[in-house]
Amino acid sequence: MAGILAIDTATEACSVAVYADGEYREVFEIVPRRHSQRLFGMLQSLLPDGRLRDHGIDAIAYSCGPGSFTGLRICASAVQGLAYTSRLPVIAISTLALQAQTALRLGEVDEEACVLSMLDARINEIYYAVCEFEEGLALVREGPRACPAADLVVEASGATLRAVGSGCHFAGDLPETIRARVRSWAPELLPHARDLVPLALAGLARGETQQAQEVQPVYVRDEINWKKLAEQGKTI
């Protein structure tokens, strides 16, 4: 099975995981506004010499957003550099799907759940997506979107929801019709990089990969722009 290096810095958590020879190794820390200080130390602790291929890594997976603007930029820049130097393909995974996958592994939801995955988007808004599971893998069915909590809409009418993520702190602001459908809340849950691995392996099998120059965050809000390597004046 393919080896995966996985990176997530989309929330106040920062984590790096390596999956190789059927085993996981992960470093996970909650380090608000310190991702740039900790990320490369984490990478070095798991891959001391930086030679990804020598450690059995076949692809790099990253949490592409939505999430913290700064965190997403840090992750995309790191992934671009690693993919460029190692000549490895990249798999982009929705942060909201990743969060649902973490919730499944930690037992906050089960495989039958319809998950309302939410993040605090600041400025009194939330990012959200509705996720379901197929063969144990989180799939985004609706979203991602950004809006004030009071404007949240779930198109899957009647479905019982399990809410996860920091956006749950806005529960009191959600429409009553949504709150009435939520059977559980997990406001403290944060995504873990290791949960990118099953999603990335499936994406790799489907050929859903990027090259270094294609790596970019998903901000949801249109006013935020990311410059790819070529647009930064860097050559490939």
Image: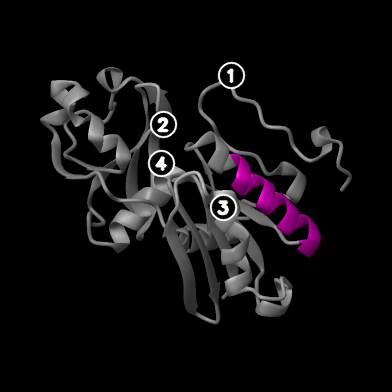
Magenta span of residues: 73-87
Q: Residue at x 35, y 51 (%)?
A: 190
Residue type indicated by callout 4: Val
Q: What label sits on residue 223 in the rendered view?
A: 1
Depicted 91 relative to depicted 172: above or below: below
Residue type indicated by callout 2: Gly
For the residue labelled by badge 2, is the local secondary structure a helix, a strand or a loop?
strand
Could you tell which of marks 2 and 3 lies nearer the N-terminus? 3
Tell me if label 4 and label 2 are in contact, CB under 8 Å: yes
- Residue 117 seen in render: no
Where residue 65 sits: x, y (%)? 51, 40
Could you tell which of marks 3 and 4 lies nearer the N-terminus? 3
Q: Residue at x 47, y 59 (%)?
A: 193
Where residue 110 sits: x, y (%)? 23, 57
Where residue 156 sits: x, y (%)? 26, 31
For the residue labelled by badge 4, is the local secondary structure a helix, a strand or a loop?
strand
Q: What label sits on residue 143 in the rendered view?
A: 2
Residue type indicated by callout 1: Glu
Read off the residue under disc 4: 140
Lateral position of residue 97 relative to residue 76, left or right? left
